[in-house]
Image (tube, rainbow, N blue to C red):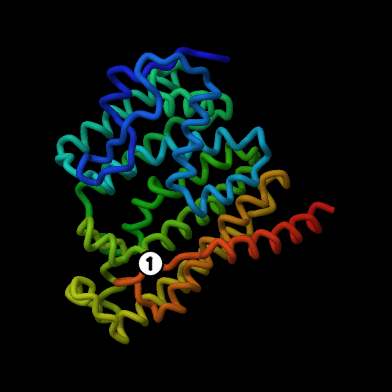
Amino acid sequence: MSLRLRLTHISHSLNLPGQSPGNGGVVSPCFALDRSLDLAAAYEHCRLINKHYGTTYYFSTCFFPKALRPPVHALYAWVRYPDEWVDNPGALTLAEQCDRLQQWQDATADAVKTGESDHPVLAAFADTARRFEIPVQYMRDFLDAMTMDLSVSRYETFDDLQRYTWGSASVVGLMMCHIAGVQDKRAIPHATSLGLAMQMTNFLRDVGEDYDQRGRIYLPLEDLRRFDVSETDIAEKRITDNVIELVRFEAERTRTIYAHADAGMHYIPKSSRLPVRLARVLYSRILDKIERNGCDVLTQRARVPTSEKLRVLIKEQVQHTFAAA
């Protein structure tokens, strides 16, 4: 299948994420206006977005079967655009952010319905969504969560937080299930847990950044009170004993969620299991790094170095080979 992709009104108004924080996440288009492109080029555009932003995620996706990599990249790129407008708005006003999200939702609905779009990411994602029968409701739930980020910056309880993470993370995992060929519906709660665990890992890693740059606290307020941690502690970057205990509590809670996700790994076809396992293990290593950093999530950002990623890859490849034998 091929189509003429033109970065015309809709693609220009939606813009590409990245480059200049002072420019509302806008970069120069990767393609010139009115350039003829086929679907393969649209998927390549998505791959470049994934490679630029994804780091650990991109590393893991490279181990999907070759035929599944383009759809995985398309899903990542489709998610990344609204995420950038919400998290890194630059000069965008709140009204403009809302407008971008609404445009993306409307354009997505049109693209999935017709199978066509002038925007490379929407063209690739629509092709993916139609081929793998991704439920439209998952797309709506994700964009609802992005909209929630524009007005909600605190969550009273863990249950409240999970209403957000369902859309921001878990449905992304469920969309991945469709791409990976997961057939058994018993996989759904485990895939939901994996999305939640990875999102919780991000929340814990980025406590300082989320507060400083976006005014958000994703850790449940009931947990802050339980460990007698105040918002002032976060604002003033005080790594007190109470903050350390809070971080350890959230890390252990997240590990428990990872364990529930692990119990459903066998539902994933063997051909797609390695990259999912790899992403899961590498993300959970961030929790280890946080604790090795003295639970300082206010002034440091825990990272997994490339050398460690390669060691994890070798170990997972060996285990995957024996499991497939």
Instruction: Look at the picture and state if 193 lies above or below 180.
Output: below
Instruction: Look at the picture and state if 189 lies above or below 134.
Output: below
Q: Residue at x 51, y 24 (%)?
A: 41
Q: Residue at x 23, y 57 (%)?
A: 213
Instruction: Look at the picture and state if 30 lies above or below 184.
Output: above
Q: Residue at x 27, y 74 (%)?
A: 224
The N terminus appears in which quarter of the rendering?
Answer: top right
The percent position of residue 142, horizontal first and vertical second, equals 38, 41
Which quarter of the figure has residue 185? top right
Query: For the residue labelled by badge 1, is the local secondary structure a helix, a strand or a loop?
Result: loop
For the residue pair 241 and 19, the one nearer the viewer reads as: 19
For the residue pair 194 and 39, the one nearer the viewer reads as: 39
Return the residue found at the far bottom.
241
Q: Residue at x 28, y 84 (%)?
A: 240
The percent position of residue 108, horizontal first and vertical second, equals 38, 26
Q: How many marks?
A: 1
Q: Look at label 1 and name its amino acid.
A: Arg
298 vs 95, left or right, is: right
The percent position of residue 222, horizontal first and vertical second, equals 28, 71
Q: Residue tagged by mark 1?
A: 301
